[in-house]
């Protein structure tokens, strides 16, 4: 009898094990999605929950316009006082710093790493489909809404958080949020997409929890390795450069009439060396003189203790930033808050690899070919906010408006792994990145430009719905490693042909023969092939014209140029 019972029990156990293998498992696109948006994505409020509740940071459009009017007017007024008072930097500072501080004091942190004010925010713990249109507009960014729209709003959740806090503290909150979503959806795993600062929060989550509960994880324009924008700011490396300003405005002008006009004015000044030296030089001198007041009266007392900003300082700038902001020594409490993420940032590759060993699929998507916000004289390759080098974890990048080996020379990939990881425009060599097989780049796309209608989200959604680890070789026709965001057509085009920019005849070199062939195409005598259009459309307006012929001649002669 006992032997029979044992046999029956053993048989039942074997049946249960077999059933576990044949029971249907949710496909990746049926899994719930957790969206971890970026810096300032969750609206923070002072006097939260009371009749005096007010958005603490960059509220309605009216508030933003008021801020621009207040601070911009005060800045111009300060310059006037500076000029009329024999270059009095203190008068300049006294004019505009109070106007600046008014907008940053509500979210400010003390230098010991604690917040100055009580802040609250709305917790969004339901699928996005369950919110009204008015609530969606109030709670979520365009990135969150468009991602949810393409993925499926009934399965998409957005993690709301106080983005001023340490990513490590936020990672603990994210853990609870993910577990709550899993429980609500009856899911073993979730898919996750993180934008900008959200990647730092997710990296801290993976460090603490591994990847067992994560199916697909996509870092979009990730700030997991920091940005030189904050690194320079916290290290005191501030210097306006007229050409960096010009580059930034020209590239930004494709979406704004105001910046287009400003770009034209700056370009005019930059084109005349005397003007640039006389006027812009004087403005830069005034700014350099007032910077110490800005640090002493604004940045250090209000922002230097904010843990999330320290998470955005690249590792190579970290110690220098502490010494610059706190020459007499950093507060021990603040250091205890910020040092742990610096260590996580340093160990990022090992953390991701360990999560992959747990079964998590991982990918990075980001933009490039934008001028960094010009707080310094650097011309780094970026998406305007984060350096490509940091987003990709070590890609080798040519400077903005330049290419490897002076354009016309054939560049040799640094790490020869059997695959081509060099962009067709010779600006990026992905072979040196942390995950060269799992990183996709979109030329001309700015930091938060992802949109449901122009193709900028297509690769992200494709990756989120993957049933295995996708690489840049999985679908080279639709999702190659490098794509082009055409600023004229407002659409992303996959770049599927490997070729040298300007090499219209595909000879392996750029010379006058290419210019002659391009001229025939421009004149309508020859119909351009797909390859010729990709390598010959230098200004990326969707066709080969005489303007492109001019640039091809520049490339052939190794003459530096700026695309107008």
Image (spheres, helix red, strand yellow):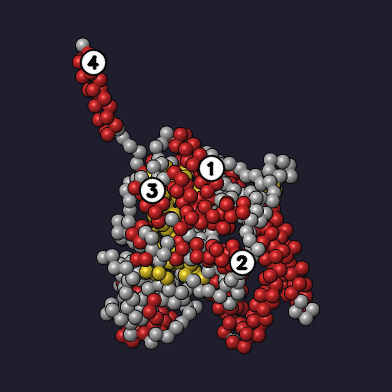
> What's the distance in space between the residues labelled 3 and 2, CA to CA?
36 Å
Residue at 65% x, 44% y is 120
Label annotation for residue 5: 4
Taking 376 as reference, is 202 above or below it? Answer: above
Q: CA distance from mark 1 to mark 3?
A: 19 Å
Image position, residue 482 (x, y; %): 37, 64
**Spatial separation of the CA atoms under disc 1 and disc 4:** 48 Å
Which residue is at a point 23% across and 18% down the rendered structure image? Answer: 6
Which quadrant would residue 50 be assigned to in this image? top right
Mark 1 vs mark 4: give the one in front: 4
Q: Which residue is mark 3?
A: 355
Contact check, label 2 and label 1, Cβ < 8 Å: no
Q: Is residue 396 above or below residue 65?
A: below
Q: Residue 46 versus residue 486: which sits nearer the camera?
A: 46
Q: Is residue 257 visible?
A: no
* Earlier sequence position, callout 1 versus callout 4: 4
Above or below residue 380? Residue 50 is above
Q: Earlier in the sequence, mark 2 or mark 1?
A: 1
Disc 2: which residue:
324
Question: Are there few (<14), some (14-19), or many (20+) residues within 10 Å of tag 4?
Answer: few
Q: CA distance from mark 3 to mark 4?
A: 42 Å
Sequence-wise first label, 1 or 3: 1
| Circle 3: element type | helix
């Amino acid at each position: 009898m006992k032997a029979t019972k044992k046999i029956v029990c053993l048989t039942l156990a074997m049946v249960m094990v077999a059933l576990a293998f044949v029971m249907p498992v949710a496909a990746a696109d049926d899994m719930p999605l957790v969206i971890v948006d970026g810096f300032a994505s969750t609206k923070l409020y002072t006097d939260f929950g009371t009749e005096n509740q007010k958005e603490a940071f960059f509220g309605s459009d009216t508030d933003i316009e008021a801020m621009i009017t207040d601070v911009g007017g005060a800045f111009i007024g300060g310059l006037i006082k500076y000029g009329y008072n024999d270059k009095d930097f203190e008068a300049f500072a006294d004019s505009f710093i109070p106007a600046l501080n008014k907008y940053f004091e509500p979210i400010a942190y003390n230098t010991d790493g604690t917040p100055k004010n009580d802040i609250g925010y709305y917790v969004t713990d339901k699928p996005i489909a369950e919110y009204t249109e008015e609530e969606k507009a109030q709670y979520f960014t365009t990135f969150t809404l468009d991602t949810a729209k393409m993925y499926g709003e009934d399965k998409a959740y957005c993690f709301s958080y106080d983005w001023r806090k340490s990513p490590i503290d936020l990672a603990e909150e994210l853990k609870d949020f993910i577990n709550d979503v899993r429980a609500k959806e009856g899911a073993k795993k979730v898919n996750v997409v993180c934008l900008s600062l959200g990647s730092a929060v997710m990296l801290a989550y993976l460090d603490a929890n591994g990847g067992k509960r994560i199916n697909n994880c996509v870092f979009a324009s990730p700030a997991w390795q920091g940005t030189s924008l904050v690194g320079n700011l916290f290290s005191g490396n501030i210097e306006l450069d007229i050409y960096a300003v010009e580059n930034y405005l020209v590239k930004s002008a494709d979406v704004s009439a105001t910046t287009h006009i400003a770009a034209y004015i700056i370009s005019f000044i930059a084109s005349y060396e005397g003007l640039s030296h006389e006027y812009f030089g004087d403005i830069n001198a005034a700014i350099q003189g007032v910077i110490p007041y800005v640090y002493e009266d604004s940045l250090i007392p209000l922002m230097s203790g904010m843990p999330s900003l320290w998470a955005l300082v690249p590792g190579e700038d970290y110690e220098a930033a502490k010494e610059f902001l706190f020459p007499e020594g950093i507060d021990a409490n603040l250091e205890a808050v910020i040092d742990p993420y610096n260590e996580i940032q340093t160990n990022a590759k090992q953390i991701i690899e360990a999560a992959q060993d747990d079964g998590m699929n991982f990918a990075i998507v980001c933009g490039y070919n934008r001028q960094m916000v010009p707080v310094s004289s650097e011309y780094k390759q970026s998406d305007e906010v984060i350096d490509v080098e940091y987003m990709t974890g070590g890609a080798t990048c040519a400077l903005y408006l330049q290419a490897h080996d002076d354009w016309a020379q054939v560049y040799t990939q640094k790490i020869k792994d059997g695959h081509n990881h060099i962009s067709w425009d010779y600006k990026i060599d992905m072979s040196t990145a942390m995950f060269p097989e799992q990183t996709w780049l979109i030329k001309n796309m700015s930091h938060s430009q992802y949109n449901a209608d122009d193709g900028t989200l297509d690769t992200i959604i494709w990756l989120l719905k993957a049933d295995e680890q996708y690489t840049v070789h999985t679908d080279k026709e639709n999702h190659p490693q490098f794509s082009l965001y055409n600023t004229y057509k407002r659409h992303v085009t996959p770049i599927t042909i490997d070729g040298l920019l300007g090499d219209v005849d595909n000879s392996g070199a750029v010379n006058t023969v290419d210019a002659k062939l391009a001229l025939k195409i421009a004149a309508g005598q020859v119909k351009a092939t797909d390859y010729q259009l990709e390598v010959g459309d230098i200004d990326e307006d969707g066709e080969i014209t005489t303007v492109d012929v001019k640039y091809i001649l520049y490339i052939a002669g190794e003459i530096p140029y700026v695309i107008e």
